[in-house]
Image: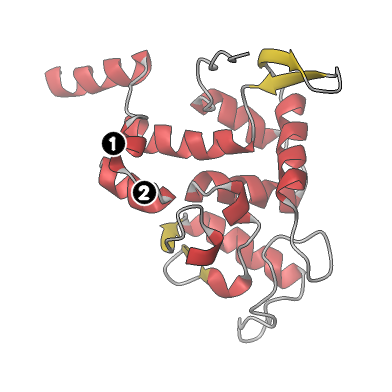
Amino acid sequence: MKLPKPQTRAFSQGELERFFAVIDNTQHRLIARVTYESGCRVGELVSIRLKHLDFDECAITFAAENTKTRTGRRSIITQGLMSQIAAYLKEQGLIAKRNGKLREPDAFLFSPGGKRPYTTNRIRQIVRRYVKRAGLDETYAAKMDTNGRRMSFHRLTVHSLRHSHITHAINAQGLPIPVVQAQVGHRNLKTTAAYSGADWDTQARAYRQVRG
């Protein structure tokens, strides 16, 4: 059975604010923020090590072996988010408070404890918890699996944070499509350009700006 596509897999600006507002766990908030601001895939997120953080440039390096396209890249995040990451790492004892140096460069940025990273499935569960808490959980299709169990397909997932980054960067922030492509690591420019369909608010704002 071919499933219908959801109308949109991205958070609107209002939905995104509601989502972030209900996250009361520091690590979980950083997980969501890093995913959204960098536009990374969940598999790339769990592979981030402390040595991949550039605190001066507010950038994260995604090593080629950890990306879907097997091409490395650097993605920009805000100064505010990088400062929050630094504060979090200091609390965890992973950054020396005196000189600011990393104590364990090979440690994973996000870990449930010890030296192992989160699994991608655990990250999906974390994001889904807060989507539900924010009252944003919607299904767009359902089907039965091979064991006769009902499977529901949800509109907003962890991957929606990546979709949201691309959609907002192009349509709301007006960033050039090739720049967004470099940030999120699409192999083909057409993949990034597919997000450029403007919603009504973006369309109206753009025309009012140029027409006065």
Instruction: In the rendered structure, find residue 174 and report the number of the disc placed on it.
Output: 1
Q: Residues within 10 Å of mark 1 (few under 14, many from 20)?
A: few
Is residue 62 visible to us here? no
Residue 38 appears at what percent x and percent y?
49, 51
Q: Position of residue 42 (x, y in %)?
A: 61, 48
- In the displayed structure image, the side of residue 67 where residue 193 appears, left or right: left
| Residue at (52% x, 49% y) in the render | 40
Residue sitting at the far bottom:
99
Query: How far across and down, in percent of the image, does residue 207 sit?
Result: 20, 18
Which of 7 and 93 lies nearest the eye of the viewer?
7
Distance of label 1 from label 2 (alpha carbons): 21 Å
In front of the other: 72 or 89: 72
The residue type indicated by label 1 comes to Gly
- The residue depicted at 57 percent of the width and 31 percent of the height is 16
Numbered tag placed on residue 187 in the rendering = 2
Vertical placement of 158 versus 153: above or below? below
* Image quadrant occupied by the N terminus: top right
Camera-side residue: 94 or 208? 94
Q: What secondary structure is found at the residue carrying circle 1?
A: loop
Image quarter where the C terminus lies is top left
